[in-house]
Image (cartoon, grey):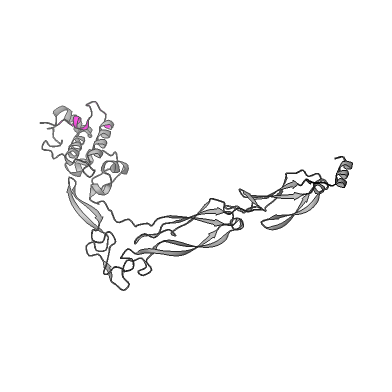
Amino acid sequence: MAKDYYNILGVSKTSSGEEIKKAFRKLAHEHHPDKQGGNAEKFKEINEAYQTLGNEQKRQQYDQFGQSFSGGGPAGGQGFGGFQDFSRGNPFGQGFSSQGFNFGDFEDLEYVFGGLGDLFGGGRKSGKKSARGRDLEVELDVDFSEAVFGAEKVIDLQKDINCPECRGSGAEPGSKVSNCLHCGGRGRVQRVQQTIFGNMATETICPECQGEGKKIEKKCRHCHGEGISKGSEKIKINIPAGINDEQSLKLSGKGEVASKGTAGDLYLKIHIRPNKKFNRAGDDIRSEAHISIRQAALGDKIEVETVDGLVALRIPEGTQSHTQFRLREKGVPHLRGRGRGDHLVEVIVDIPKHLDRQQKKLIEDLNI
């Protein structure tokens, strides 16, 4: 019984060439034999239909004479006709050629076949991915001045480390380590399958060495061949000047070590201990200075404490309580960039709570 190519592709006889190509792409992607649930026979049938309907001349002959026209897919189902016919029915636009495989539209090839290697015998490669150790997060307390000016710290971290006996190799010291005979040291083995496209090579992890490519004569007794053990590591940390509370530092490769793999990262979450004299607001530092009524009324020069030490501050006449004075560049260094924040001094005028009779008389006489 003659096949209805239009029905196979799910299109009508009035469909445009672009609509036919779109339908083919969708069905080919859905039924590709390398996909889970794919159907090789259905895929071959879809391709056979597109070889005809995707070619304007063949489509006209098919519409006039049916499936038996010369040059169409044979009724016996051989429909592939080799890559030469496949290229004539080019579903991928300009640029595809069976002569030397000149591809002009890689996206379409990837969309339909899930990878060029699958179609042309290059095969899919799958090797053992390098194992990576766990990332670690540690909270670290620092003093206010250490956060402002930076500091060097050393922490002792308990974690998975490279086995000190075998240095992470998993082999007993002095024992022989050789290439895996099964895979020749590659860590992968090749399997060839027959498909509708011909022989297709697929590479998988070697079952003998589990992708390592090496065979150990004798496993390390200390770590039982894993290459890792529990231990401690002293890590030197440079706290950058200007770091703020709750910020984190990343130390690449200082996390836990994976078995015969790479180490994860270490994240340090910084906590700044409170300071009785100073408060921080971004890169500015705030503090208070207490003065007397006389100093506020008549003015004076006082010394205020900063992170750099004592600094002279002039109090002008008639200063009101809670007035703020700014000391430029006496704050926290900018973490990302040059310069520093400022130091803001809030002046508090102290009012005496208890006055004797003479003091009261003097204030009354001043009439202020």
Q: Is residue 279 above or below residue 30?
A: below
Q: Nearer the viewer, residue 357 or 37?
A: 357
- Asked whether residue 210 is drawn in magenta, I would say no
Q: Is residue 189 above or below residue 25?
A: below
Q: Which residues are magenta?
A: 1-17
Q: Nearer the viewer, residue 26 or 231?
A: 231
Q: Nearer the viewer, residue 129 or 264?
A: 264
Residue 166, quarter of the rendered image: bottom left
Say whether residue 366 is left or right of residue 58. right
Residue 95 visible in the snapshot: no
Tag count in the figure? 0
> x, y percentage for residue 361?
88, 44
Quadrant including the N terminus: top left
The outermost residue toward the top is 14
> x, y percentage for residue 190?
22, 56
Quadrant including the C terminus: top right
The outermost residue toward the bottom is 174
Say whether residue 318 is left or right of residue 345. right
Say whether residue 171 is left or right of residue 47. right
**Secondary structure character of the magenta stretch overall:** loop
